[in-house]
Amino acid sequence: MTDKTKPATPGATNVADVADFDAKLAAATGKVLVEFVQEDCVFCEEEAPAVDALALTCGTRATVLRVNVSKEKLKPLVERFKLEELGGTPTILYAENAAKLNAGKGVEVDPTQARRRLKCTVKW
């Protein structure tokens, strides 16, 4: 995802660094959806509008974060959430709450599965 060339669009909340990620998770109340992306990832670009639609439509039911792991200061999250084992990017992790996500109990989902878990009506 080339966030430096694209204007910000409403949707998933971009994370600046690991401390920002941890702060946003700590503030999360309820369900959590985290999309891990990287720059120049075609599949990430294709999936982003669906995740943004989830954030806009289901924002009261979940905290929806986007983590660009191309940024050096976010690379520690690759290891923390074992993205290499999950197949890299894009990866979306869903958890009932931040504590479960931090405990490694997040479930990998695609946008449609996320929509179902959030019990949210989204058209894309």
Image (cartoon, rainbow, N blue to C red):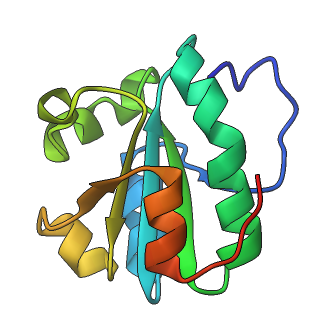
Residue 52 placed where, x, y %?
A: 70, 53
Residue 124 placed where, x, y %?
A: 76, 52
Looking at the image, the residue that sits furthest to the top is 40
Q: Quadrant of residue 9?
A: top right
Residue 12 placed where, x, y %?
A: 65, 55
Total marks placed: 0
Above or below residue 23? Residue 43 is above
Residue at screen point 51% across, 79% down: 118
For the N terminus, which image quadrant?
top right
Residue at screen point 24% across, 68% down: 101
Residue at screen point 52% across, 58% down: 112
Above or below residue 62? Residue 47 is above
Above or below residue 96? Residue 88 is above
Q: Quadrant of residue 6?
A: top right
The front one of 65 and 53 is: 53
3 relative position to 94: left or right: right
112 relative position to 53: left or right: left
Residue at screen point 63% across, 79% down: 120
Residue 19 placed where, x, y %?
A: 39, 54
